[in-house]
Image: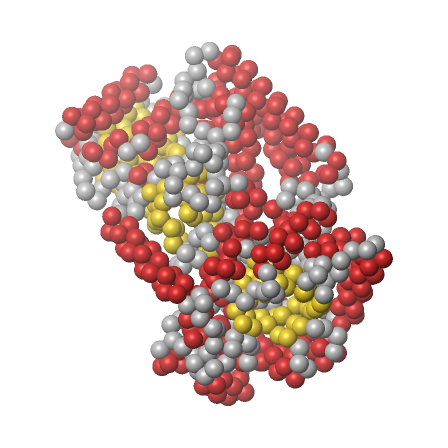
Amino acid sequence: MAEQVSAQERLDKIVVLIAANMVAEVCSTYVLRVDNTLELYATEGLNRDAVHRTVLSAHEGLVGLVASEATPLNLNDAQSHPAFSYRPETGEEIYHSFLGVPILRAGNTLGVLVVQNRAKRTYVEEEVEALQTTAMVLAEMIASGELAALAQPGAEPAARHSLHKTGAILSDGIALGHVVLHEPRVVITNYIAEDLPKEIKRLDTALAKLRADLDRMLERGDLGEGGEHRDVLETFRMFANDQGWSHKLHEAVGTGLTAEAAVERVQSDTRARMLRSTDPYLRDRLHDLEDLGHRLMRQLVGRDHAPTREQLPDNAILIARAMGPAALLDYDRKRLRGLVLEEGTANSHVSIVARALGIPAVGEVPNAPGIADPGDAIIVDGTSGSIYVRPSSEIESAYAERVRFRARRQAQYSALRDKPCKTKDGQQVELLINAGLAIDLPHIEDTGSAGIGLFRTELQFMVSPSLPRSSDQLALYRTVLDAAGSRPVTFRTLDIGGDKALPYMETVVEENPALGWRAIRLGLDRPGLLRGQIRALLRAGGGRSLKIMFPMISEVAEFDAAKAIVERELTYLRQHGHSLPERIDIGTMIEVPALLYQMDELLKKVDFVSVGSNDLFQFMFAVDRGNAKVSERFDSMSAPIMRALRDIVKKAQAAKKGVSLCGEMASKPLGALALIALGYRSLSLSATAHGPVKALILDLDAKKAEAMIMPLLDAPAGSVSIRQKLTEFAEAEGLAL
């Protein structure tokens, strides 16, 4: 009980001191509870019996208005305000003037601090700022959990309550662990300035250094040609030199705050207002200001607060606003269990790397860095897109059991590793893995796969801070071929450009990047880049079999031009006495619908084809797969796409050319079932999906599945759900999906 009294006494003393210093007759602290109500926790001037008895809804009265708007409210006659709510138990009807400020932390409202006077007066700006400063101290007190002991069960302060958020699935899996912030908030130990001129000087020095750093970044040679990355930095510089921002910071210091406390307050106020804005442009600008604030804070404290590899706890769950793939790879993957992002789609670079690492990840979580503190318990459910911060023991137990169940299933899949991949009716199905980095290579052995059906060569370029040299490319390709041994590896040439922009290359701003200057289009326009890569591939393949695949071919003439570069490089290497591959197979991705009407001409020239179902689906239905509003609008198993897939496999088989599918569709058991029923006998999928898909194949009668699906394709489009029929078939056959 001593702790309870201590916490209450501290609060009581604080409101008494505030009232005395501000010459206010009333000072009250309201704390936001888990049930989204505001409870009176302490007061000086109002009826003391109302403490812990007066409870307002989060939108009720003037206090509720301050909480919901997250902005100060300054009134000379509170009772005349339309939002005024009369609570007889408080005795506040005799007070006219009202000043309420939100208690903010990381953009989240934790409560409201109020002062009142009987006389009708408008509080001056200095008084508003003084109250905001005090609110910052109260925010840390509430966030620490100190007040939880004062609360009734079910009415605890919201600052430390269990939180459930839903976002977009970036990488499958479930992770339980503790929060690590990628850009952690600087812990401020001293809020009140002892020497104001000294604090102003510290702020000015930090601002000058911040601006100088941005100027240097803009003057770097690789930014001289312009591009989107330069525009971003120019915007940064504009914000950094903004007099309004600088003035707010100086004003905050002028109220008696230290320089870092001033930055924190301006950041928190701005964040709270902008998070409530409906204007998407303003919300985007918030990220710019946030980043600037972080940079300025690091200048003031003189060190980077990001955790080192050694400091990373076991079972770390990383939370970030946004991050690149290279930043993710900097963390110790043995300790990293999950990832939560405010930004990022399933097709973003960091998501691809997360999947390669087997790290569950959820994106599009609003104000992600503000939902938890370092060390908080957290669950990331990459199967549903759910996040649980500070989960209850019941939820934690349920998820722990799910993790154990998944582990048991994984053990069952591992037992299938060495079994021949044949259907129940004896049809051989080749299962390969998708890869793109050296960290993917152990998966070949772990899964018992037949090889690599898609090696994304662009990932090396995406995680590198500068353009990889020919020697770096050669070393990676040799490492990949060595790891595969006698098993085939299909190398896809660079699929960059468009939405896969490289920071060290000129960025072309395009309205439709997925349809723009990317992949083979960029390679043919910049032949030096493509030739360098093909030369590295041919040298790596010396004395072995090599498979090269070109992405985003739209017409046969493009394939001819790309193949001519391979022939040219072969001639060069032959002339210079290099060892050549024993066999070279050259193929193409089928992902542009135009190729569907050139199949006869194409199949005469290629050695193999591989369907890129992600882009093919995107282009056929004219949907941006990174846009949540439309990406799920059409069914990837509807008649149009299924008919296209059937026609591709039929023509390839008739021409006796190899055909496989390497998109996300193959990584789902139901998708794999559909593809096998259509006639595909080679699938390339993520390593994590290998076990579930193989388990399905071993229990599947392929002829039965084919007999079931083919009539459905000829039925009028939309008259029957192919997905539903496949699901019913799987259930009837006892297939695990």
Residue positioned 61% across, 23% down in the render: 209
The answer to whether residue 47 shows anywhere in this view is: no
Instruction: Say which of 239 and 141 sits in front.
Output: 141
* Residue 237 x %, y %: 64, 32
Residue positioned 45% across, 47% down in the render: 339
The picture quadrant where one finds residue 32 is top left
Instruction: Say which of 8 and 26 sits in front.
Output: 8
The picture quadrant where one finds residue 595 is bottom right
Residue positioned 39% across, 34% down in the render: 105
Residue positioned 57% across, 22% down in the render: 206
| 137 up-or-down from 402: above or below | above
* Residue 530 x %, y %: 75, 56
Left or right, residue 381 beside residue 502:
left
Instruction: Say which of 107 and 672 sits in front.
Output: 672
Quadrant placement of the C terminus = bottom left
Quadrant placement of the N terminus = top left
* Residue 697 x %, y %: 45, 75
The answer to whether residue 377 shows anywhere in this view is: yes
Left or right, residue 620 beside residue 361:
right
| 576 up-or-down from 96: above or below | below
